[in-house]
Amino acid sequence: MRQIICFGDSNTFGYIPGTGKRFPWGVRWTSVLDEKLAGTDLRVVEEGLVGRTTIFEDPLRDGRCGVRLLPVILETHAPSDEDLIVIMLGTNDCKAIYGASPEVIAKGVARLVRQVKAYSDKVKILIVSPIHLGENVWKEGFDPEFDENSVEISKKLAAEYRKISKAENTYFLDASEYAVPSDTDQEHMNEENHKKLATAIYENIMRMQCA
C-alpha cells in the first residue's frame, strides 16, 4: 500500500467547531478521503495537530512547530518514492502573536517542502492553502489569538502558496475554493465542509496519479 501522509493543523485533526473534541472517523476529511480511496493501493496517514504552525514556536503549547516535527514524522512513516505528502498549514501562523506576513508564512511552507525533498526527491507533494478565517474570528466570543489583520492575511495565503508550489514544482490546491469555516467558531470546518474538502483533494490526487 502507498501512503498519503496528511500533515496539518486542527482542520486536519478534525476539530469540532466550538467543542474542543474531534470528529469521528468517517467525518473528518482525512478519513473521508481514505474511504474514497477504498479499492486503490492508497491509504491515508493522519498527522493533524491542533495549533500546528509552519515555522513558529507557540509560547503557550509545546510541539507545534511544523519544521521541527516533520522530519520526525517522515522517519516514523518512512514514505517511499511512490508515496504522497499533503501539507495544509498556515492558519495558526496568522495569529497576532507571530506578526507574520503572507509571504513569510509561505516561506515556512517552502521550508517544509524542502524537508520532504531532502528525505526523498521523488515523493509527490500537494500543497493545500488553508480555508480563510471567518470575518468575526477575532471578535469577543471567538478566538482572541487572532486579530482583524489575521483575516486579511489568511485571504492572501493562496496566492503566495501558489508561487511556492510553482517554484518548488509541487502540486497545489486552494482549500478556500471548496470549503469555509463554520459560523460556530469562524475557524474550523463543519461536517459538510470536511466532505467538500475531501472530495476536492480526492479529485486532485486522482489527477496526480495520471500525471
Image (tube, rainbow, N blue to C red):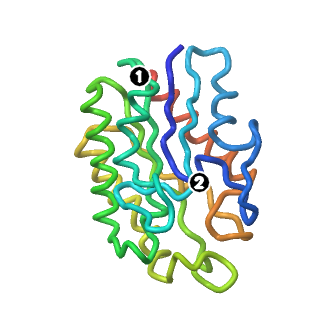
Q: Which residue is mark 1?
A: 78
Q: Quadrant of the C terminus?
A: top left
Spot the residue most to the bottom.
Answer: 140
Q: Give the x, y percent position of residue 21.
A: 74, 54
| Contact between labelled residues 1 and 2, with CB atoms less than 8 Å apart | no
Sequence-wise first label, 2 or 1 = 2
Q: Is residue 111 visible?
A: yes
Relative to 140, say whether 187 is above or below.
Answer: above
Q: Secondary structure at mark 1?
A: loop
Residue 10's disc is 2
Task: Report the side of 109 relative to 202 (left or right).
Answer: left
- Structural crowding at the residue carrying mark 2, measured as other residues with C-alpha within 10 Å and reported as few (<14), some (14–19) or many (≥20): many
| Alpha carbon distance from label 2 to label 1 | 23 Å
The answer to which of 66 and 175 lies nearer the viewer is: 66
Q: Amino acid at mark 1?
A: Ala
Relative to 142, say whether 208 is above or below.
Answer: above
Q: Amino acid at mark 2?
A: Ser
